[in-house]
Amino acid sequence: MKILILGFFFVTLSWGEGIDSLLHDYAQESELSKKTKDESAGNLVVYTREDLDRMQVESLKDLLKSLRFFSYSENRLAQPDVLNQDPISYYSKGIRMYLNENELLSPIAGSGLILFGDMEMDFIDHVEVYIGFPSFEFGVEPATVVIRLYSKTAKHDEGGRVKAMLGSYGTNKQNVYYTNEEDGLSYFIYANRTDDKKDTYTHDGETLRRDLRTNRFYGSLSTENHSVELHALKSEGDMFLTSAVGNVPRETYKGTDFI
């Protein structure tokens, strides 16, 4: 009789530990994007909040460099174009980008990658990347790669944070965000300034640069049934054209405004 009682106690204890473990795993998946991801849309790579922190990801291009099937690169105009180095024809139109289910799109290039491929990740909670055959799953035009970004929310990040960084060649970045939730109303406010300075090159007596200065604002206001988002971007910088045939331009400039 004692043997039966000990056996029953052991089985009960093991079952309880298994339930706790399952609940913990389920909670982690639910906190991520259990309701948003669609594994049938292609090969899915998910970067959780823990992944982004562990990898010390500062910008989206840091994340794209870690993918197996393609790697982040820029054309001669310093524009993100992973499939082509020629700035005349933009070949990465099949790469679609979304922020909280809203597509980030450049009407000229046909893809938001050209504007947001190097965006900072300080206000992003997690990322889903779908890679596969051309699919109409996410839009009216076929997409070979879909990058879905999800911003931080008051549910997981209530409060505020200020961040400042200083890098080589004088590179610096400052951003701040604050989020709160009360009486069924939640809001998130984020502002960032980045001055990305790179090494300079001298060719035929001219100094070539690829510096980029970026200012970004993102804000969201949501209730149980409604939400409003505002995303504004302004960037300006120097376009490094490498060795131009016959001459080197004295000055090159690129500017972007997005709302």
Image (cartoon, rainbow, N blue to C red):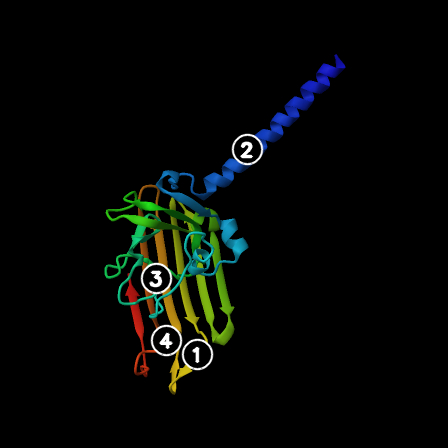
Callout 1 amino acid: Thr
Report which residue position mark 3 lands on: 81
Label 3 or label 2, whichever lies nearer to me, is 3
Callout 3 amino acid: Asp
Seen as rendered, the residue at the extreme bottom is 205
How far from the left and from the top, in percent, is residue 77? 33, 70
How far from the left and from the top, in percent, is residue 149? 39, 51
* For marks 3 and 1 on the same chain, the one whose residue lies earlier in the sequence: 3
Residue 215 occupies which quadrant of the picture? bottom left
Circle 2 sits in a helix, a strand or a loop, which is it?
Answer: helix
Viewport quadrant of the C terminus:
bottom left
Front residue of this view, candidates 52 and 65: 65
Report which residue position mark 1 lands on: 200
Seen as rendered, the residue at the extreme top is 1
Report which residue position mark 4 lands on: 242
Q: CA distance from mark 3 to mark 1?
A: 22 Å
How far from the left and from the top, in percent, is residue 119? 39, 61
Label 3 or label 4, whichever lies nearer to me, is 4
Callout 2 amino acid: Leu
Report which residue position mark 2 lands on: 22
Q: Residue at x 71, y 16 (%)?
A: 5
Q: Seen in the image, is 191 located left or right of residue 14? A: left
Asked if the residue at tag 1 contacts the one at tag 4, i.e. Cβ–Cβ closer than 8 Å, the answer is no
* For marks 3 and 4 on the same chain, the one whose residue lies earlier in the sequence: 3
Circle 4 sits in a helix, a strand or a loop, which is it?
Answer: loop
Circle 3 sits in a helix, a strand or a loop, which is it?
Answer: loop
* Vertical order, 10 against 187 (above or below): above
Q: Residue at x 43, y 54 (%)?
A: 124
